[in-house]
Image (cartoon, helix red, strand yellow):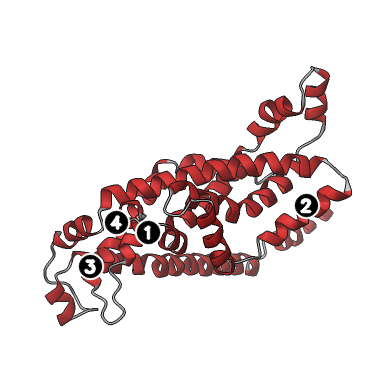
């Protein structure tokens, strides 16, 4: 009994150190502070844009960074009419939706054989696609313009969709090939034993498993296509076919910039995409998290 009781204080002393707990609390507090700081730095520019869009031109001229004294919705109504918001938004939705569908279908169909075929030519083709991800669009604008002209696809939605598909297809092939390589081949072998061919195995077995990588890819592609300015500005000459970002760009004057007209146009341009991601954020996050383990 004496020996057992003599060990208790030493055991209690060893099992309850105080300094590591203080260090953990300090690290947690520092991480929380950095998180709040990053959130504030991210939100402040957006709040400044919204507040400036609601101010009058005279109020902004008097104190650009000061406290606003008057608010108005006239800036948004003027921008709404000047950028032809309704038709330009429909044009952007059409181009973005068709581009996402083409990129997803072609990328998955190309990534599946490149992930399963181990021949030398498949590795060469895969590396060629990877090389395409390093080519900026500015380098190929002139050849693409001549190609679209010869194919009579200038100033057409189809031409712009083809360009976006060609630009983003290497990235889609990289995403799908890397993801399909992590899928067990046993699933496809079991489907083959049940009599499924290559195409049926892909559409019935493999394609449903690609939902996580597809949501990640569509998030990236939709943001890039929606916010792009170069391709629709060069390849769409008809003002009725221009996208919302191109029409918002028309507010930028090389000599003077009026925030009360530019900021509302920019906010209206990103509003539909923001609404889409708000409504589908659960599906996007679920798709990304579902592919985290794989």
Residue 181 in the figure: left or right of residue 217 = right
Classify 10 Å Cα crowding around label 4: few (below 14), some (14-19), many (20 and above): some
Q: Is residue 262 above or below residue 279?
A: below
Quarter of the figure that contains the C terminus: top right
Q: Which residue is mark 2?
A: 125
Residue at image coords 52%, 45%: 100
Q: Is residue 84 visible?
A: yes
The tag on residue 237 is 1
Q: CA distance from mark 2 to mark 1?
A: 35 Å
Residue 183 in the figure: left or right of residue 246 = right
Viewer-proximal residue, 29 or 97?
A: 97
Classify 10 Å Cα crowding around label 1: few (below 14), some (14-19), many (20 and above): few
Q: Is residue 41 above or below residue 2?
A: below
Viewer-proximal residue, 160 or 95?
A: 160
Q: Which residue is mark 4?
A: 268
Q: Element under label 1? A: loop
Q: CA distance from mark 4 to mark 3?
A: 11 Å
Query: Residue 148: where, in percent of width, then height?
Result: 52, 55
Is disc 2 in contact with disc 3, using a CB cutoff of under 8 Å? no
Q: Nearer the viewer, mark 2 or mark 3?
A: 2
Residue at the far right in the pictured view: 119
Q: Which residue is mark 3?
A: 261
Q: CA distance from mark 2 to mark 4?
A: 42 Å
Q: Nearer the viewer, mark 2 or mark 1?
A: 1
Q: CA distance from mark 2 to mark 3?
A: 48 Å
Viewer-proximal residue, 41 or 236?
A: 236
Which of the marked residues, 2 or 1, is nearer the chain's N terminus? 2
Residue at image coords 88%, 45%: 119
Which of the marked residues, 4 or 1, is nearer the chain's N terminus? 1
Q: Element under label 3? A: helix
């Amino acid at each position: 009994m004496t020996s057992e009781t003599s060990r208790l204080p030493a055991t209690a002393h060893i099992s309850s150190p105080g300094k590591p707990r203080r260090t953990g609390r300090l690290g947690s507090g520092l991480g929380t502070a950095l998180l709040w700081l990053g959130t504030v730095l991210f939100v402040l520019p957006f709040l400044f844009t919204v507040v400036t869009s609601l101010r009058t031109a005279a109020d902004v001229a008097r104190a650009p960074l000061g406290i606003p004294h008057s608010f108005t919705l006239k800036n948004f109504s003027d921008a709404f009419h000047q950028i032809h918001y309704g038709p330009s938004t429909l044009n952007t939705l059409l181009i973005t939706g068709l581009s996402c569908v083409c990129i997803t279908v072609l990328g998955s169909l190309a990534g599946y054989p490149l992930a399963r075929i181990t021949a030398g030519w498949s590795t060469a083709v895969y590396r060629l696609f990877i090389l395409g991800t390093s080519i900026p669009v500015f380098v190929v604008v002139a050849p693409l313009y001549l190609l679209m002209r010869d194919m009579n696809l200038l100033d057409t939605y189809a031409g712009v969709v083809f360009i976006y598909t060609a630009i983003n297809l290497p990235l889609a092939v990289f995403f799908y090939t890397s993801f399909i390589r992590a899928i067990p081949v046993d699933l496809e072998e079991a489907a083959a034993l049940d009599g499924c061919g290559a195409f049926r195995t892909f559409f019935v077995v493999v394609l449903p498993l690609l939902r996580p990588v597809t949501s990640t890819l569509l998030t990236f592609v939709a943001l890039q296509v929606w916010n792009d300015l170069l391709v629709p500005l060069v390849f769409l000459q008809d003002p009725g076919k221009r996208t919302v970002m191109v029409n918002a760009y028309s507010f930028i004057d090389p000599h003077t910039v009026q925030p009360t007209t530019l900021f509302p146009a920019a906010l209206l341009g990103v509003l539909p995409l923001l609404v889409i991601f708000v409504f589908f954020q659960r599906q996007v996050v679920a798709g990304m998290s579902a592919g985290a383990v794989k």
